[in-house]
């Protein structure tokens, strides 16, 4: 697959390993699968936790990995120095915008505040028609069950439209995740790369 046609998958996830071994195992499996399909990985640029696991796995399989990390976290999260590209930015806002502009799809593995911030913001941008890229919640071991219940509650209470709730593609394993992304790419009528995202980076 040529570089010009390579698709890039952005993964949001925790900088901790989590309490269950399957979180780390799934992060590694996802990294291997992304590289194995010839896609590139975009992520937060750290070596710690699930972030480091998904990146190391993709690299070990010969994949290209782009990391984006703000200056303030360069040492705290121990920036990954072995990536294909590592971009140091000034703010968290710049980090999210650059990751979004480089990606053709988004996947959230288990994580905390940061992961939720990144995934919910990218969903908000989809709701606002800033992009039409697939957004997948990889619900490892039911980790996101409570969040999904909340989203359904938001629909019931009139704060979230059903059509926007449906933008959250939910999968339970890595093969299902890549299949959902593939299906979504096939259905996208507009170009995967949206210049509106470039404006957010500036």
Image (tube, rainbow, N blue to C red):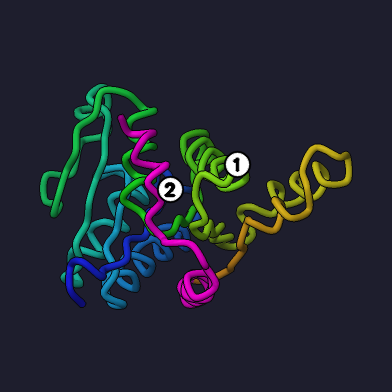
Q: Position of residue 22 (x, y in %)?
A: 47, 63
Q: Residue at x 28, y 77 (%)?
A: 36
Q: Which residue is mark 2?
A: 13
Magenta stretch: helix, strand or loop mostly: helix
| Badge 1 density bin: few <14, some 14–19, many ≥20, Cα 10 Å | few
- Front one among 62 and 202: 202
Label disc, if present, on residue 128 of the rendered structure: 1
Residue 19 visible (yes or no): no
Measuring from the top left, give residue 201's x and y in whole percent.
33, 34
Is the C terminus in the top left, top right, bottom left or bottom right quadrant?
top left
User: Where's the N terminus, which quadrant?
Assistant: bottom left
Q: Are marks 1 and 2 in contact (CB under 8 Å)?
A: no
Determine if residue 54 is in view: yes
Quick one: label 2, few (<14), some, or many (20+) residues within 10 Å? many
Quarter of the view holding residue 93: top left
In depth, the one of 186 and 105 nearer the eye is: 186
Q: In front: 8, or 52?
A: 8
Q: Is residue 54 magenta?
A: no
Q: Which residues are magenta?
A: 174-202
* Residue 63 vertical position relative to residue 143 in the rendered view, above or below: below
Q: Residue at x 80, y 37 (%)?
A: 159
The answer to which image quadrant residue 10 occupies is bottom left
| Residue at image point 45% right, 60% down | 21
**Where 127 sits versus 132, above or below?**
above
Q: CA distance from mark 1 to mark 2?
A: 23 Å
Element at label 2: loop
For numbered disc 1, what is the local secondary structure? loop
Query: Which residue is pictured at 41% across the width and 51% down the height?
Result: 194
């Amino acid at each position: 697959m040529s570089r010009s046609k390579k698709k890039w998958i952005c993964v949001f996830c925790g900088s901790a390993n989590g309490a269950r071994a399957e979180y780390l195992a799934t992060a590694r499996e996802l990294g291997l699968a992304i590289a194995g399909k010839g896609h590139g990985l975009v992520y937060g640029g750290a070596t710690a936790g699930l972030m480091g696991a998904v990146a190391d796995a993709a690299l070990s399989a010969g994949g290209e990995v782009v990391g984006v990390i703000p200056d303030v976290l360069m040492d705290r999260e121990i920036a990954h120095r072995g990536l294909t590209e590592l971009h140091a930015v000034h703010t968290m806002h710049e980090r999210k915008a650059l990751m979004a502009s480089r990606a053709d799809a988004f996947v959230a593995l288990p994580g905390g505040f940061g992961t939720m911030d990144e995934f919910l913001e990218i969903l908000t941008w989809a709701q606002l028609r800033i992009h039409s890229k697939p957004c997948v919640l990889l619900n490892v071991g039911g980790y996101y069950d409570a969040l999904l219940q909340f989203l359904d509650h938001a629909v019931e209470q009139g704060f979230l439209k059903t059509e926007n709730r449906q933008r959250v593609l939910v999968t339970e394993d890595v093969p299902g995740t890549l299949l959902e992304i593939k299906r979504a790419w096939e259905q996208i009528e507009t170009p995967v790369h949206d210049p509106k995202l470039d404006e957010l980076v500036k």
